[in-house]
Amino acid sequence: MIAGADDQIERDSMSEAVAATAHDDHHEVGFWGKYIFSTDHKMIAKQYLFTGMAMALIGGFFAYCFRMQLAFPGMEVPAYGVVSASEYNSLVTNHGTIMIFWVAMPVLIAAFGNFLIPLMIGADDMVFPKINRLSFQIFLLSAIVLLGSFFVEGGAFGGAWTSYPPLSAKAEFSLTPLGSTLWLVAVALEFVAFLLGGINFITTAMNARAPGMRPFDVPAVVWMIVIASVIFMLSVGPLIAGAIMLLFDQVLGTGFYDPGKGGDPILWQHMFWFFGHPEVYVVLLPALGITAEIIAVFSRKSLFGFRLIIYSSIGIGVLSFVVWAHHQFIAGIDPRMANIFTITTLLISVPVAEMIFLYIGTLYGGSIKLTTPMLWALAFIAEFLIGGVTGIFLGDSAADIYFHDSYFVLAHFHYTFFPIAIIAVFAGVTFWFPKMFGRMMNETLGKIHFWGTVIPFNCIFLPLFVLGLGGQHRRIYNYQHFPDLAGAEFQDLRIFATMAMLVMLAFQAVFLFNFFASLRKGKAAGRNPWRSNTLEWTTESPPPHGNFGGDFPEVYRGPYEYSVPGREDDYWPQNIPG
Amino acid sequence: MTTRHLLEASALMVLGLLVGADASEACSVCIDPSAASRDAFGMTAVVLSLLPMALVGGILFFLRRASRDR
Amino acid sequence: MSVESTAIEPRLGRDPLIPSAVLGMLIFVFSEIMMFSGLISAVTIARAGAAEWPPPGQARLPLEATAFNTLVLLASGIALWWAARVFKEAPSKAYRSLLVSMLLGAFFVCFQGYEWVGLLREGLTLTSSNHGGFFYLIVGAHALHAVAGLTVLSFAFLRLRSRRLTPDFLAATQVFWFFVVGLWPFLYLRIYL
C-alpha cells in the first residue's frame, strides 16, 4: 500500500496535468509498454479477458477428458490418451479450480470490473493504476504456477478443488508431493492478485465518480462489482489463514489438521467454506449486474425497481456471510448450527428471487429486441433459476444428508456456475465488444453460437440430476466397478451427457471465429451502437488513453432513463443536460 | 401481524431450534466431538460471520457522519 | 507536476470523504483483520479440542515479559498518534515523536525475537506440538506485519525529513500501524493467556 499512496499522489498530479493540457503531449509507448506493462485499465481488462478465455479453453479440455472417461471407461481419449485414475483426479480437481478461480473470477470481476468501472463512472483510470498492473502480473504468475503443476513429479494435485485435509495435507495420502503445494501456492497468489484488484475497484468507485454522479446514478453493474469486491475482501482472510496452515502441514510437518497431533480436519472446512460460499455471490453479483444493463437496454425500459435491486444485492452481500456452513451438514458439525444455517440458506434465496422478478418486471411491456446479448441475458435468468431452485433442496439439512456429494449437487452448481461464468460472460462480451474493440460482432454467428451452447448445456446437466437422484456419487473414476451404478440405464445417460458436451465444445469454435473475425473485419461500431445511456457509450469506441479525451462528462440523471414520455429519442444519456 | 407477534414467533422459533437440535442428532453421519470443541466451532462461526458486518457497518457509519458534517 | 496540479481547482464531486490512499489501506487492513480472526478462530478451536492447553511437557510462554512488551507497542501507537497530531499543526515538529514511535516498534520486534530464541532453546518449536505451531505461526505473522509497518514508518520518516510527507501518506501509515498495534492485545489474550 506504500506504493499505493505513492501511486495515488503521482496519479493525482498526472491526471490533473493531463486534464489541463488535454493530451497534446501524449507520447507513444512501445509494444511492451502498450500490451504487456500497461497501466491502462482497458488494457489490463483485456489481458484478464484473454487470459480467462485461454484458461476456459484449458478447463473445458479437462472436462472433455474426464467426461470421455466416464462415458467410455478405459477408452483412449482422442488428443489425450488413456486417463489413469490419478490423472482423472487431477483433471477433475483442476477443472473446478480453473473454472472458478481462473475463469469466473478474472473475467467477471477483474476484466469487466477493470473495463467498466472507470468508464461507467466517468474517470480516466483506476485510482491506483500501478497496483492494478501488479494485480494482473501476480494473477498471470499464479496461472503459470497452476499449469506448471501438471509437469512436476507426481503430477498435479488431485484432492478436489475443496482440498480437504487429511487427503491434501500429506504427500503419502495425496501422492502429489509437489503438485499439492504448487496448487496451494497458485491459489494463494491468485487471492493476492484479486485483493489488489478489489482495493482498486472499491476505492475508484467511491472516490473517482464523475461530477454530479450520486450513488443511485451509478449503473447497477458497477454497484454489484463493488459489492462483490467488498464480499471478497472480507471473506478471503480466513481462507488465506487456513491455506497458510495447510501449507505448513504439507511442507514443514506441523499438525494443524492432523487429529493424531491434536489438530482438527473440520477446521479446514470451517475456514475454507467461510470464503467458499461468499465466493459464489462474488461471481453471481457481477453476472446479475451485466444482465441488468443488457435487459434495460434491449427492453428500452427503465430498470424496474432499480433501488430495490441494489438493496437486494446489499442484502445478498450481508446474508452471504451467514450461509457457509451448509456445505458441512454431514461433516459432523453441531446440529444447532446446522439448523440455523438451513434457515439462513433458505432466506438468501429471497433477495435472489426478488431480483429475478424485478428483471422480469423490466421485460414486461418493453419493446424487446432479441439481439445476441439479450438472448444471453434472458438465458442467464432462465438457467440460473433452475440452479437456484434446486439449491433449496440442498440447503435443507435433512434432505442434504441424502443429496450430499451426489451428482445432484454437481448438476445444481453447474446450473448456477455455468450461467454465471459462461452465459453471463458471453452476454457481457457480446454487449461490450463494440466498446472494447470498436467493431460489431456478427449477429447470425452469435445466434448460432448461442443456441449451440444453451441447448447442449441443458442436455449435459439435466441427466446428471437424474443420475444424482439415482445415487451416483461424485468423484468416481469408473462406475463400472460399482454394480449398483453400472447398469445401462445409468450408462446411457452418462454417454448422452458426454455427447452433448462434445456438441457444445464444437460450437465454441463458432464463437472464437466470430470473435477474431469481427476483431479484424467487423462493421465499425460508432460511439453508441446500442443507443444506451451509460457513460461508457459517450466516448469513442475503443476509448482513447484517458478515456474521455480530456473532456470529462458530467452527470445529470440516472442510468436507465429509456423511453421517457415527451422526448424524441427513446434514450437519454446520463451526460446530456436538460 | 404486529411487531409483538413477530417477536414472539421468532423467540419460539429460536427456542424450537435449540430444543429440536437434540432430536436431529440422531443422524447417522454426525460424529460426536466434545461439547467444548462444538461450542468453539459455534462461537468462532458467530464471530467470523458478524465481524465483516461490523467492519463495513463502521465505515458506513463514518461516511454517513462525515457527509452530514459537510 | 505539483505546480501544474495547483493550477486547476479540484473538479466538483471529486472531493472524497476518505482520501483514496487511506481508503485503500483501510480495505487492505480489513482483509488482514479477517485473516487474523481466521487464525484466532483456529487456535480457539484447537484449544477447545485439546484435553490440556498448553500440552504437557511444552515450554510455558513468558507472560510478564510479553505484557511489558505489549505496553511498549501500545506506547509506540500513542507516539504515532501524537506525531500525526503535531504534524497537522507544524509538520517539522512531528520529527521527534515519529522517531520515538519507530524506536519503540523496533524494540518490540527485537524483544520478541529475543524471546523466540529463549523458547526455541527450551524446546518449543514449530513441530513440537500444535501449541508451538500456532504460537510461531500467529506471532510470526504479526511480527512480519510489524516489520512491514516499521518499513512504512521509516518511509514516512524519510519523507518527513525531505519535506515530501503528505497528510494522506501519513494517515495511511497510521491506519496500518494502528492495526499492528491494536491487533497485538487480542493475540496476547488468545495465545499467551
Image (cartoon, rainbow, N blue to C red):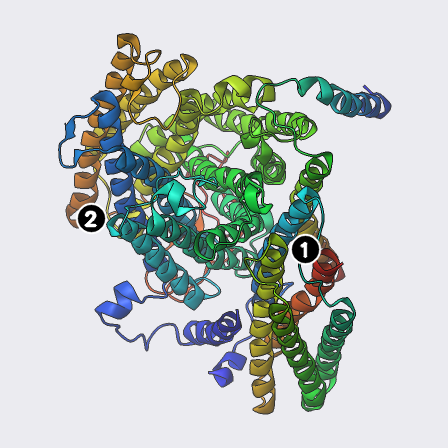
Q: Which residue is mark 1?
A: B59
Q: Position of residue C106 (x, y in %)?
A: 64, 80
Q: Which residue is mark 2?
A: A519
Q: Chain of mark 2?
A: A
- Front residue (pair A73, A174): A174
Relative to A158, residue A21 above or below = below
Q: Position of residue C36 (x, y in %)?
A: 62, 56
Tell me what residue is drawn at x 67 percent, y 80 percent: C107
Residue that extends furthest to the front in the rendered view of this protein: C57
Do callouts 2 and 1 point to residues on the same chain?
no
Mark 2–mark 1 distance (CA, rounded to whole Å):
44 Å
- Mark 1 nearby-residue class (10 Å; few <14, some 14–19, many ≥20): some
**In which quadrant of the rendered view does residue C114 lie?**
bottom right
- Front residue (pair A424, B39): B39
Amino acid found under the numbered disc labelled 1: Ile
Q: Position of residue A528 (x, y in %)?
A: 34, 46
Q: Is residue C149 left or right of residue C77?
A: left
